[in-house]
């Protein structure tokens, strides 16, 4: 925008449209950056402002004509505003993004939107390729750093993910999203003290963030600091005592610290009732049954482990629990 800034009277209508559209891109996509230029009223009867208006309503505008890069890519910003991203919407965006990138292959916006699209589709390898292109062009942009590091982490590249999130601009280093992503990566790298520091900084800004109250409890449990973990679990449980991760953490504390097998059994049975397909809940139940030679939620260790093994036959821990259960029940064959 700075490259063609001039007096208002000297702008053409097309330039005013470009100014307006550029401001909209910043507001929708790069929301942490401020729009530092004046936006002028423009005629709404053009494909560019029309596409932006549709995006703000959560609608993909297929009437832009796709005559140039902007008219092709603008409707895809609906990935930020749509209440639900169903398969039809993702297909529309995919076709438009691919076409837009043939017109401008190095576009930060185009590659970033492609990264978002494939991340939403669960194709993390393809997402990583596009996000790398966006990151290489704009390595200090917070939104790119956050998503790229998440995808890298998902793809098992935690060291690079940590490097990427740390490259965010210094003005954004204390942004809550940056702190959160830094906490996740540090935890995955088993850097528990560093993860706890990031989590504490998040909770200083948002003390009622239940997700991070539970995350801090999880870190304390990993560090075997059960006293602090229990107080955080109590705090979380007063707000939501049906969350799966909360129930699993509570059961682990009851089992490993309190040595209260009966309470742990009751808690994991509650988890299985609410989340009968949870592999983590089934595994914890199998562990307790294996330890006690008693059924949990009406099933023995081998029966609980068998449910896991049907989905993941290579789970060696589940195989061991199944073996324990079969031996306890004298099922020698």
Image (cartoon, rainbow, N blue to C red):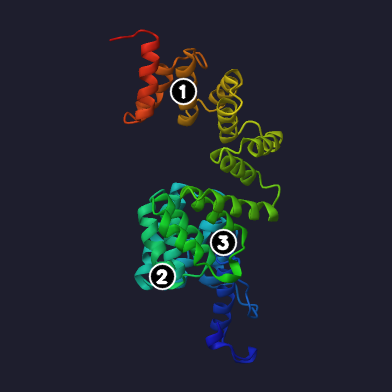
Q: Is residue 200 left or right of residue 29?
A: right
Dot 3 corresponds to which residue? 54
The label nearer to you, 2 versus 1, is 1
Furthest toward the top, the residue is 330
Quarter of the picture containing the N terminus is: bottom right
The label nearer to you, 3 versus 2, is 2
Please, what secondary structure does the residue beneath circle 1 have?
helix
Label 3 – label 1 distance at C-alpha:
53 Å
Label 2 – label 1 distance at C-alpha:
47 Å
Q: Which mark sits nearer the N-terminus, 2 or 1?
A: 2
Q: Position of residue 186 (x, y in %)?
A: 50, 52
The numbered dot on residue 136 is 2
Would residue 66 be seen by someone viewing this image from the given angle?
no
In this figure, what is the number of numbered marks?
3
Residue 37, quarter of the rendered image: bottom right
Q: Residues within 10 Å of mark 2 (few under 14, many from 20)?
A: few
Q: Which mark sits nearer the N-terminus, 3 or 2?
A: 3
Q: Position of residue 328 (x, y in %)?
A: 40, 11
Label 3 – label 2 distance at C-alpha:
30 Å
Q: Are marks 2 and 1 in contact (CB under 8 Å)?
A: no
Please, what secondary structure does the residue beneath circle 3 have?
helix
Q: Where is 305 relative to 13, above or below?
A: above
Q: Which mark sits nearer the N-terminus, 3 or 1?
A: 3
Q: Identify the residue at image location x=60%, y=39%.
A: 225
Dot 1 corresponds to which residue? 287
Q: Identify the residue at image location x=42%, y=60%.
A: 114
Q: Are marks 3 and 2 in contact (CB under 8 Å)?
A: no
């Amino acid at each position: 925008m700075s490259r063609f800034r001039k007096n208002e009277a000297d702008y053409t209508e097309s330039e005013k449209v470009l100014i307006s559209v550029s401001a909209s891109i910043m507001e929708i996509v790069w929301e942490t950056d401020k729009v530092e230029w004046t936006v002028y009223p423009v005629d709404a009867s053009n494909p560019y402002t029309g596409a932006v208006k549709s995006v703000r309503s959560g609608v993909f505008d297929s009437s832009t004509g796709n005559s140039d890069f902007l008219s092709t890519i603008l409707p895809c910003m609906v990935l930020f505003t749509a209440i639900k991203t169903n398969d039809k919407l993702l297909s529309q965006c995919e076709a438009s993004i691919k076409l837009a990138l043939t017109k401008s292959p190095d576009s930060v916006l185009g590659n970033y939107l492609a990264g978002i699209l494939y991340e939403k589709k669960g194709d993390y390898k393809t997402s990583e390729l596009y996000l790398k292109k966006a990151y290489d062009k704009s390595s200090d942009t917070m939104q790119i750093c956050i998503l790229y590091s998440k995808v890298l982490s998902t793809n098992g590249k935690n060291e690079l993910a940590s490097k990427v999130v740390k490259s965010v601009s210094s003005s954004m280093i204390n942004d809550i999203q940056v702190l959160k992503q830094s906490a996740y990566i540090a935890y995955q790298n088993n850097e528990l003290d560093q993860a706890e520091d990031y989590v504490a900084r998040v909770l200083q800004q948002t003390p009622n963030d239940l997700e991070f109250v539970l995350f801090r409890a999880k870190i304390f449990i990993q560090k075997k600091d059960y006293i602090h973990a229990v107080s955080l679990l109590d705090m979380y449980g007063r707000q939501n005592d049906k969350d799966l991760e909360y129930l699993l953490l509570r059961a682990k504390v009851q089992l490993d610290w309190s040595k209260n097998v009966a309470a742990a059994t009751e808690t994991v049975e509650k988890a299985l009732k609410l989340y009968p397909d949870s592999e983590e809940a089934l595994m914890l139940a199998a562990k307790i049954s294996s330890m006690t030679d008693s059924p949990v939620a009406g099933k023995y260790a081998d029966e609980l482990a068998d449910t896991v093994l049907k989905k993941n036959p290579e789970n060696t821990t589940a195989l061991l629990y199944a073996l324990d259960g079969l031996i306890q029940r004298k099922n020698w064959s």
